Image (spheres, rainbow, N blue to C red):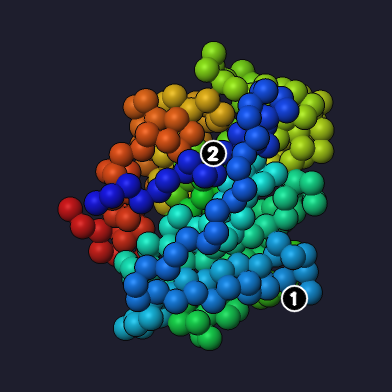
Amino acid sequence: MKPIFRASAGLVLLLAALSAQAQLPPAPPETPPTPLPSGVRAVRDLAYVPGGHERQKLDLYLPEKSAGPLPVVLWIHGGAWLMGSKDNCPVVFLATHGYAVASVGYRLSMQALFPAQIEDCKAAVRWLRANAKEYGLDTNRIGAWGASAGGHLVALLDTTGGMRDFDVGENLDQSSRVQAVVDFFGPADLLKLGEQSGTNSVINHDAPDAPEARLIGGRLKDNPDKANRASPVTYVSKDAAPMLIVHGDADPLVPHEQSEELYDALKKAGADVQLHIVKGGGHGTGFPSEVGKLVVKFFDEHLKGEAKP
């Protein structure tokens, strides 16, 4: 099986967002949307907030043939909450494995401060449930997968599943809880990003213009309450949905200790959680094909109930 997740494009976008701080080269233009696999159709630019912001839309990738309602996996893109797009969805391949894939756009930090980003993700989940019959979706089997900033947001989707604080807007009669989450190298405890960063870090997380500071509207150490409110570890409980966390131990942007801390907190709470550390892995780079197999097995187990040995 070929590697199913290539984060190089997302990494370039993220590095571009940090270039002023880290003296890094600018990013090239974004690539066009990923070509569709055979047997997969796309329904693009579905507004999950009627009359909302231009980024409050999702693309839905569906198998052309299915035997019944499809389990759904949301893809939440990265880009430091500053950049990125739903158009480049690296997990469309899941539609060839019997899933519907929803690639979700959300408001970036220059358009709206936190909690706008998690409010958008939750609104997308509620919209999918409200419109499930039209697209043949299984409302009881919804998962989420995200990388970097997207990993942070799917982890928040998971740990806040039992609360309604971030549920605003339309379809409030629907739940925003998800049933399984894959978090690729997402920040988990914003206040500890600086102290956990090693010598290979290319970003000063304590700076007033760090991506996390732009997300919450101020320097992390000057706004501890806002930083904690935006941190998945704040909401950990035994009721969290099953989570698979993947992180490279040579990540120069998000220290792998973030994922280890989230794993430890979920494990202590009694939640179902797995942690896979990629030896020598960077910020989504250097991940072997075995990681992809692990993700497919995880979703099959928790969204289909048919994990393969």
> In the rendered view, would you say 143 is above or below 261?
below
- Image point 50% across, 82% down: which residue? 135
Q: Earlier in the sequence, mark 2 or mark 1?
A: 2
Front position in the image: 24 or 289: 24
Circle 1 — which element? loop
Residue 69 is situated, as x and y percent measured from the top left of the image, at: 40, 80
Q: Is residue 112 left or right of residue 230?
A: right
Amino acid at circle 2: Leu
- Image point 60% across, 43% down: which residue? 28
Residue 243 is situated, as x and y percent measured from the top left of the image, at: 43, 48
Question: Mark 2 or mark 1: which is in front?
Answer: 2
> In the rendered view, would you say 148 is above or below 46?
above
- Image point 60% across, 22% down: which residue? 202
Looking at the rendered structure, the number of numbered marks drawn on it comes to 2
Front position in the image: 274 or 53: 53
**Outermost top residue:** 199
Front position in the image: 266 or 103: 103
Which residue bears the numbered disc 2? 11
Q: Is residue 262 left or right of residue 212?
A: left
Callout 1 crowding tier (Cα within 10 Å): few <14, some 14–19, many ≥20: few
Residue 170 is situated, as x and y percent measured from the top left of the image, at: 73, 73
Amino acid at circle 1: Pro
Please indicate, yes or no, whether residue 179 appears anywhere in the rendered image.
no
- Image point 78% across, 69% down: which residue? 52
Which residue bears the numbered disc 1? 50
**Outermost front residue:** 28
Circle 2 — which element? helix
Callout 2 crowding tier (Cα within 10 Å): few <14, some 14–19, many ≥20: many
Residue 155 is situated, as x and y percent measured from the top left of the image, at: 54, 47
Among the 4 quarters of the image, the one containing residue 167: bottom right
> In the rendered view, would you say 276 is above or below 249?
below
